[in-house]
Image: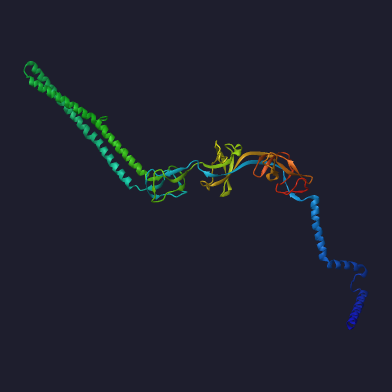
């Protein structure tokens, strides 16, 4: 009871104070009749705020499917536009020189030193590998001595044998003249009866000996002169000695293996101390010259390429650095096991980073169209069949539209019939059915 009295007393005092303030005009309080419903409404709303918020959220979530059912989902579509289209044939291949040179030894020997490294650029005549050559040097010195001996024999023929033979011929001819005079006098005396038959026979004998000596001297002069047997024999001996010397020099040269032409060594299969055999490849040289790119394309694409067509090439190791090439060779035959055709391209200015057997990707430009209707390839369905079509959009609905396509690029195709510039097509990846209502969105 005591507590209740205090509360009532407090309430009475509060009302008295409030009435006094109102009568004095010192404060403002809304009219109980006008402000009570508004205050009551906000109070109730504040008390049930979470419930009201939930109702709003549920209503909004329910409206989304309804709106989607009415206007359809938003789908990013592709537009038919005019532009240029390049049709390319993409293939992979590798770098290769027109030919390679296998460098080996021409004789059996032991490797003394290897003078180059794999990947090194060399010039024609540059020493690459040296073999032990002491025995070859000794053989060359021996043949040099044989040549010197044959040359001395030739000088002896010219300086001694031939002059001596000529001098002997002169003496024999002088003796023959004397013997001829003696024979003539004796014959005259014998006719006059002043000489005996024995004297005449002796004079005839001396004359015959003189003739024989002259013939012998003439033969000696002839054989010692050019064209004579002794001269030809000495000359032949000199030629044989010179040939043997040349062989020895060549064999000594085989001991140093040199580069046959300018290029880059792409393989090395020899080390110091190796015993090599004639004909065995020790080094492989890629000669300098045009760089070729060797491809294998499917035979179904053979009709798309021709000699002289341009291409863009990029190495797999440097995909962002492209360079130009031209189709220079198409193999006339088809590899039946792979159903492919070998194609070679020539790069006039290949980049410095290219290496032998490096893998490359090639885009060969097979055709080009300017100012034509193009559409992204992702919007064309059954593009490889005889009846390609697209999911076009008209009046907010998707429908099947057959099209006729021309060139095919990497990302776009040429539209020849079925669509006009500005028409929309739904990408294949979009989950849209024929007749479905959609909202076309620009990419």
Q: Does 148 sit left or right of 48 as displayed? A: left
Counting from the top left corner in percent of width and height, residue 310 is at: 59, 40
Which residue appears at 45% of the width and 45% of the height?
Answer: 284
Which residue appears at 11% of the width and 22% of the height?
Answer: 203
Which residue appears at 16% of the width and 26% of the height?
Answer: 174
Q: Quadrant of residue 155?
A: top left
Counting from the top left corner in percent of width and height, residue 260 is at: 43, 42
Which residue appears at 32% of the width and 38% of the height?
Answer: 243
Q: Is residue 263 above or below residue 236?
A: below
Of residues 96 and 279, which is closer to you in this image?
279
Q: Does 205 sit left or right of 1 as displayed? A: left
Of residues 5 and 110, which is closer to you in this image?
110
Q: Is residue 288 above or below residue 158?
A: below
Q: Is residue 420 visible?
A: no
From this viewpoint, which residue is outermost toward the bottom? 2
Q: Quadrant of the N terminus?
A: bottom right
Of residues 218 and 399, which is closer to you in this image?
399
Counting from the top left corner in percent of width and height, residue 275 is at: 38, 48
From this viewpoint, which residue is outermost toward the top? 192
Counting from the top left corner in percent of width and height, residue 263 is at: 46, 44
Q: Quadrant of residue 333?
A: top right
Q: Is residue 95 visible?
A: yes
Q: Quadrant of residue 126?
A: top left
């Amino acid at each position: 009871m005591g507590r209740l009295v205090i509360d009532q007393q407090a309430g009475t005092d509060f009302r008295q104070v409030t009435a006094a303030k109102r009568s004095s005009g010192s404060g403002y309080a809304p009219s109980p009749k006008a402000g009570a419903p508004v205050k009551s409404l906000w109070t109730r709303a504040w008390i049930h705020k979470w419930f009201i918020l939930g109702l709003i959220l549920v209503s909004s979530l329910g409206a989304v499917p309804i709106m989607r059912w009415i206007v359809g989902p938003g789908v990013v579509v592709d537009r038919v536009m005019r532009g240029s289209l390049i049709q390319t044939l993409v293939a992979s291949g590798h770098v290769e020189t027109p030919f390679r040179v296998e460098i080996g030894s021409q004789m059996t020997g032991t490797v003394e030193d290897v003078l180059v490294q794999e990947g090194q650029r060399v010039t024609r005549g540059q020493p690459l590998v040296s073999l032990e050559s002491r025995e070859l040097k000794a053989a060359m010195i021996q043949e040099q001595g044989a040549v010197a001996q044959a040359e001395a024999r030739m000088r002896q023929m010219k300086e001694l044998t031939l002059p001596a033979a000529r001098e002997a011929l002169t003496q024999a001819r002088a003796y023959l003249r004397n013997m001829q005079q003696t024979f003539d006098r004796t014959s005259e005396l014998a006719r006059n009866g002043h000489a005996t038959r024995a004297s005449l026979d002796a004079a005839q004998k001396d004359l015959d000996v003189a003739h024989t000596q002259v013939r012998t001297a003439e033969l000696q002069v002839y054989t010692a002169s050019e064209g004579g047997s002794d001269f030809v024999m000495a000359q032949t001996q000199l030629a044989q000695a010179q040939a043997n010397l040349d062989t020895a020099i060549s064999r000594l040269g085989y001991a140093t293996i040199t580069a046959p032409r300018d290029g880059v060594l792409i393989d090395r299969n020899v080390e110091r101390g190796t015993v090599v055999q004639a004909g065995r490849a020790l080094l492989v040289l890629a000669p300098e010259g045009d760089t070729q790119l060797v491809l294998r394309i499917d035979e179904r694409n053979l009709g798309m390429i021709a000699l002289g067509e341009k291409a863009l090439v990029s190495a797999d190791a440097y995909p962002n650095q492209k360079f130009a090439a031209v189709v220079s060779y198409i193999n006339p035959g088809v590899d039946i096991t792979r159903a492919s055709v070998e194609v070679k391209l020539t790069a006039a200015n290949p980049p410095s980073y290219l290496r032998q057997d490096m893998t490359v990707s090639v885009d060969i430009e097979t055709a080009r169209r300017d100012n034509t209707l193009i559409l992204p390839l992702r919007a064309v369905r059954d593009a490889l069949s005889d009846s390609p079509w697209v999911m076009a959009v008209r009046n907010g609905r998707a429908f099947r539209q057959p099209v006729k396509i021309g060139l095919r690029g990497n990302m776009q195709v040429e539209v020849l019939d079925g669509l006009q510039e500005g028409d929309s097509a739904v990408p294949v990846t979009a989950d849209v059915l024929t007749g479905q209502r959609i909202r076309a969105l620009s990419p």
